[in-house]
Image (tube, rainbow, N blue to C red):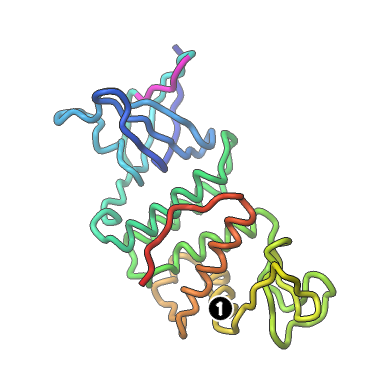
Amino acid sequence: MASTKVKGVVIASKDYKEKDRLVTLYTLENGKLSCIMRGVRGEKAKLKSAKELFSFGEYIIENTKSFNIITQVEVIDSFFGLTKDLDKFYEGCAILDIVNKISSQESDPQLFIELLKCLKTLCYDNVKRLYCVDKFLIRIFKELGYSFITDKCSSCKAGLSGKRYFNLDIGEMVCASCRNDTCQAVSDVCYSAMKLLSGMDYEKLSTLKIGGNGEVECFHLLEKNFEWRVGTRFTQIPLL
């Protein structure tokens, strides 16, 4: 049996048979991989910590005809802090599910690095709720070719000096003259939040202060855009 060594993050995990776990790894080298971890639900299992969501490490995988079997793991970071804070846990789960829904079995180093930066900031920095997932989604849409943080209407190219609308059909910003039934009004607070989040590095998000609950408006818009673009919703984040 051939074996492969990859760096990966557990983005999905569920029980399999009596003591096994079926995990989905998002890897630097091979994109998304489904793997089995045998016996890891036992109390004394050596690899039990590496089966959990968020676990980032170097995984050695045996490639059989039927399954990819993880045989060894060197955990680099468990991001354990995400499991101790309910708000961070929900946000982290949403980020993992976003990756799970948009990724394939092809390597995408930019997405892999973006995921690690996002999880690191969410886990270790004192960042306000929704900042990380908002920034992550903005980055994802940009990589998919949707540059909606602009001062010009994507349809007629007129300046967006007055009211602006998000056209869910095309995933772009339009003016009042070009809006249709699929358009959603974008407040100044929401647009300002998107612009600030887009232009700031993850490492500096803890210094950012967005007024007027702009990050919440931003999240609802980005969440809806994801559903339109991808055709499915990601794991929901409970909001008060």
Q: Residues within 10 Å of mark 1 (few under 14, many from 20)?
A: many
User: Can residue 22 be found in the magenta stretch?
Assistant: no
Q: In the depicted view, which residue is nearer to us: 231 or 7?
A: 231
Query: Dominant secondary structure of the magenta stretch?
Result: strand
Residue 175, horizontal then vertical, whole percent? 76, 79
- The stretch of residues the image draws in magenta is 66-70
Q: Which quadrant of the structure image shows residue 107?
A: top right
Q: Which quadrant of the structure image shows residue 156?
A: bottom right
Q: Which residue is mark 1?
A: 190
User: As shown in the figure, which amino acid type bears the numbered disc 1?
Assistant: Cys
Up the image or down, 127 lies above or below 225; here it is below
Quarter the N terminus occupies: top left
Q: In the depicted view, which residue is nearer to us: 124 or 135?
A: 135
Residue 10, horizontal then vertical, whole percent? 39, 40
Going by the picture, which residue comes out furthest to the front?
A: 181
At a point 48% along the width and 52% down the height, the residue shown is 234
Up the image or down, 143 lies above or below 69; here it is below
At a point 78% along the width and 82% down the height, the residue shown is 159
Up the image or down, 199 lies above or below 77; here it is below
